[in-house]
Image (cartoon, grey):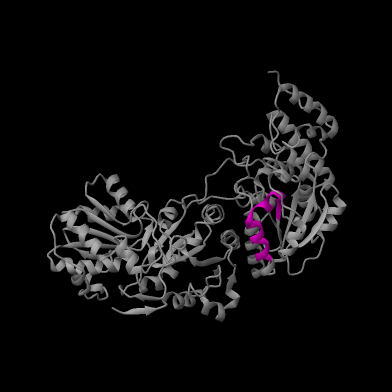
Amino acid sequence: MEMVNRPYAAAFEAYAVQHPEVLCLSADLTSSCEIDGFRDRHPDKFLSLGMAEQNMLSFAGGLGLAGFRPFLHSFGVFLYRRPYDQLLASVAYPRRRVRLMGFLPGVTTPGGMTHQAIEDIAVMRTIPNMTVLEAGDATEVETIVEQADTVDGPVYARILRGSVPRLFDTPMRIGQMRVLAEGSDVLVVTAGITTEEAIRARGALARAGVSVRHLHLNTLKPFDAAQIVDHAASVRHGVVTLENHLVAGGIGSMVAEALAEAGLARRLVRLGLQDTYAHGGSRPYLMKHYGMDALALVRAVERQTGQATGIDEAALDAVRIDAVHSLVKAEAL
Amino acid sequence: MARETPLRNEKTAEEVARGIRARVFEHTIRNNGGYLSQACSAAEQLAFLYAEALNLGPSTMPMVPPPFGGVPSAANTGYVTGAGYNGPFDAVHDRLFIAPAHYALVAYACLIEVGRMAPEGLEMFNKDGSSVEMIGAEHSPGMEVHNGTLGIGLSTAAGLAWGRKRLGHTGRVCVFMSDGEVQEGQTWEAVQAAAHHGIDNLWAIMDVNRQQCDGAMDDVMTVGDIATKFRDFGAVVAECDAHDLPAMRAAAATPHPGRPLIVLAHSRPTQGMESLMNRFPKLHYVRFKSEDERARMNTEIAAELGVSPVPLEAH
């Protein structure tokens, strides 16, 4: 599996310099959000707003009113918890074309409760006029900048930083989920970092004779409920969602709503944070501790099929992850 | 001030201020409630902005406000804000935000006095389905952004002003503020950001009436010397008596290169309606306790304003 170093930094710079209305805003986390090089090379397009997120959100609304499209960079959690009122009144209500680039989503940070955006999807998707995106690999990080900027309204995007695996060889397109496997036993729905976990689990499950249908979401709002329902209807044993987020209000809730509204009865297992805060620790430790890793997914699939697979940690470690090539139908069109 | 064109309305700021008080008084008596004290404290400030200080083009909106046209959404393609009452958006004209959105009644009265809205507009105030809302929304006459949560107006204006400077606009951005907003941390974030980025096409006039919803600010939350605090955060500060128009003109003309200007207009919450002192410090929203009080205020304040008492229907 190819690892890409700092895909956001290069992608943002390449895009922003082509678009005069695009501005780069930072709230004292410039190098942490990989825009330090941009700051140094393009100071005329960079606005430092300091540790003052309430002002930054309203200020960005004013920039939007003047016709600019500011990209706000911070840890995801800092873009909505403290400045929630400003997000609603100054950005979301008036549909300003403000792009909120939320780094370190969920348990990808060891910073503990104050730094972990674990309810951001639940919050953002309930806000009228908001579009919610999540990058799941280096290719999606590279294309989310351009995709977010096509939206005539505000966008919140969960961004991965640092060394990011490349899972996909085709760019993301807003509203188009990726069908990564077309099995017939259990439907697995993932997004962000949980997709890599599911790919690992799938490899082991396939050897154990379990046929998984796997969907990767990069667009959480608008949510393509109809397609989720179609896929859920095509499997024998129900649905498992796995998300780097609380199960309440996130992908698990979205899938539940879709199934209920369609009147489709399928058992649903929702993996993710179960009505709990996380704490500070490494990403692998946290994913294991809170039941968000490949092994937790295998156990959930076993619950759906009613059959033990015998898969253990060693079996999962042995799975080789290759990039998803378009010939295995990376895109659902 | 950078006024390029002659006054478009016949009235002086003094006359507009008198008209604002009379209209808000009449509305408050007739509806047995209203933001009357805000008219007392802010009449000269809003009159000064519309009649003299701001370079505004003619209104682009109908004299009688259209009904509520829906909130912004991808489907609501015809959505417009109420900013058209302040004139067109272009490079040369100024923009105005009314940061304390509960001053809307006073602002609407001002729009009528300067000929930008028909008197019928005030009849729609706080009526279901109307755009003339009690707490000014961005679709309300003269409003451009939501400011109902206090403290967000100056930040938004700073962003707009930075953008207009980058675009080469000569028009400035003005915020009408209230002193209660200095209790919100965001106000200080906004001032420091505007100073840090040299946003000097931004200025504010603040109604320093020392009142807030719970009563006198000194009893609710002491804010200290706000002039010094604003200066320490990087603004140029000028002060004036909010009821002395020549002093207000001088304060607003204070040069402020590289920094935002904050004009502190020290006001009296009962200016022109001294009878309201009977209610002090309960002045945020005036609702009369009895028909007797209503009738007495009607007579007394009308006499102070030099207008006729409001004819009241028999109950």
Residue plotted at (54% across, 44% down): B69
Quick check: B121 above or below A269? above
Q: Quadrant of the N terminus of chain A?
A: bottom left
Side of A268 where B116 appears, left or right:
right
Residue B270 picture quarter: top right
Quick check: B236 above or below B7? below
Quick check: A28 above or below B113? below
Q: Quadrant of the C terminus of chain A?
A: bottom left
Residue A194 picture quarter: bottom left
Q: Which residues are magenta?
A: B175-194
Side of B25 where B102 appears, left or right:
left
Location of residue B32 in the rendering, given as x and y in whole percent from the top left corner: 69, 29
Would you say the magenta stretch is mainly helix, strand or loop? helix
Residue plotted at (76% across, 42% down): B113
Residue plotted at (75% across, 41% down): B39
Side of A14 where B80 appears, left or right:
right
Residue A50 picture quarter: bottom right
| Residue B172 is inside the magenta segment | no
Residue furthest out toward the bottom: A41
Q: Answer whether residue B4 is visible to the viewer in this image.
A: no
Which residue is more in the foreground, A93 or A307? Answer: A307
Location of residue B215 in the rendering, given as x and y in whole percent from the top left corner: 70, 40
Which residue is more in the foreground, B159 or B13? Answer: B159
